[in-house]
Image (spheres, helix red, strand yellow):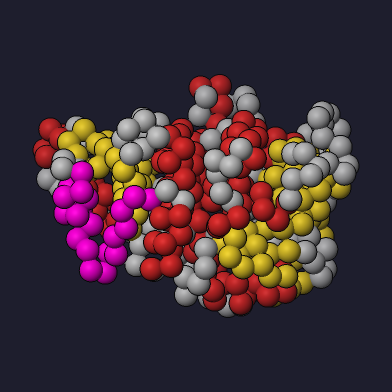
Amino acid sequence: MRAAVLEEVGKPLVIRDDVVIDEPGPGQVRVDVKHCGLCHSDLSVVEGDFPAPMPVILGHESAGIVESVGANVEGLAPGDPVVLTPVPPCGACYWCVRNEPSLCVNMMGLATNTFPDGSTHLSRNGEVVFRGMNLAAFGEQVLVPATGAVKIAPEIPLDVVCVLGCAVQTGVGAVLNTAKVVEGATVLVQGLGGIGLSVVQGARIAGATRIIASDPVAGRREVAKQLGATDLLDPTSDDVPSRTHELTGVGADYAFEAAGRAALVESCLAAVRNGGTVVAVGAPPVDQNITIAPAAGFTISEKKLLGCTLGSANSLREIPRLIALWQQGRLDLEALLTHRRPIEEINEALDDLRAARGIRTVLSF
């Protein structure tokens, strides 16, 4: 099959047409990828901020058509349209049985770039190719556990709903599942890419009465306003914590870091009120740390700092819920889709992402 392969950190991806993908085994399905969104986490691997073994196929925000199924697969058949998820819940591990499916043992593939048994089921010229971001959707086909492919109605456009796989599932889920934002709350969102704008929409859906959106790119701030933000801040000129306290009187009830910068988590901690909640949604480079000082002040303030993987979502439930919200007009997916390119233009798409041009680029096979 064809795939865009990262062979060396910092180098352009190379389109190879001789990647071998295995047949589906028991409990697995093979999917023809039709569309895949380009996420900043993919760029972080390309630039070395997230270490990964090479060569690797990235891409983890995708939708396609089931091509074949292995033994013991129920509910999916060749020809079914599906949205793929990078964290398929196994349903049986320590975390799944405690209703924490985003922490499922399958989540470790985000770090290992393999299946739990260490295999990738991908090769080229007899050598292993790694399964980037637990999916490898910059290839024409992917092999996934059956729970990693969520069946959808045939009339739903795959090029639109592919962004549910990461950006929207993560952003809306961070609000509804991780933070459990209550109606009438005040919310700060720092970083207005695909995930941050999804956080804005999640806050609106939750009934937040004040949604403060911060990003250095003016165009992204304007999109946030269209999607429900009530106040816009430019971090290049505004002191975001101070302005948040001015706008709310006491500090935000909830603050979300969605740009993948550790310093912004600290900024969010300064921006929330005593008793407020900060959710770290973005994925900073692995060498960045968060400093909480003074520790005694954090203790007596009763502020809460939460991590968030994939919006703390069970994709088997979350993706249908998000599609229903989109169909009801309560969730805008199209506003996030600013560029469409064939997979052959993936390096140009990465340049757009580096330059913060647009919101989401959807790549097509």
Could one spot residue 185 in this view of the protein? yes
Instruction: Please give the name of the residue rendered at 77% of the width and 64% of the height, measured from the top-left corner.
Output: 365
Decide if residue 304 is on the left or right side of residue 283.
left
Quadrant location of residue 362?
A: bottom right
Spot occupied by residue 119 in the image (x, y as percentages of width and height): 70, 48
Instruction: Please give the name of the residue rendered at 43% of the width and 67% of the height, measured from the top-left corner.
Output: 219
Q: Nearer the viewer, residue 256 or 48?
A: 256
Spot occupied by residue 337 in the image (x, y as percentages of width and height): 59, 60
Spot occupied by residue 270 in the image (x, y as percentages of width and height): 19, 48
Q: Nearer the viewer, residue 160 or 296?
A: 160
Most extreme residue toward the top is 97
Residue interval drawn in magenta:
229-248
Badge count: 0
Could one spot residue 50 in this view of the protein? no
Instruction: Please give the name of the residue rendered at 54% of the width and 76% of the height, measured from the top-left corner.
Output: 351
Identify whether 277 is placed above or below 197: above
Instruction: Please give the name of the residue rendered at 27% of the width and 64% of the height, measured from the top-left corner.
Output: 235
Magenta-colored stretch includes residue 283: no
Decide if residue 223 is on the left or right side of residue 109.
left
Decide if residue 176 is on the left or right side of residue 249.
right
Decide if residue 244 is on the left or right side of residue 76.
left
Magenta-colored stretch includes residue 247: yes
Quadrant location of residue 122?
A: bottom right
Q: Nearer the viewer, residue 34 or 305?
A: 34
Spot occupied by residue 6 in the image (x, y as percentages of width and height): 63, 69
Q: Which corner quadrant holds the N terminus?
A: bottom right
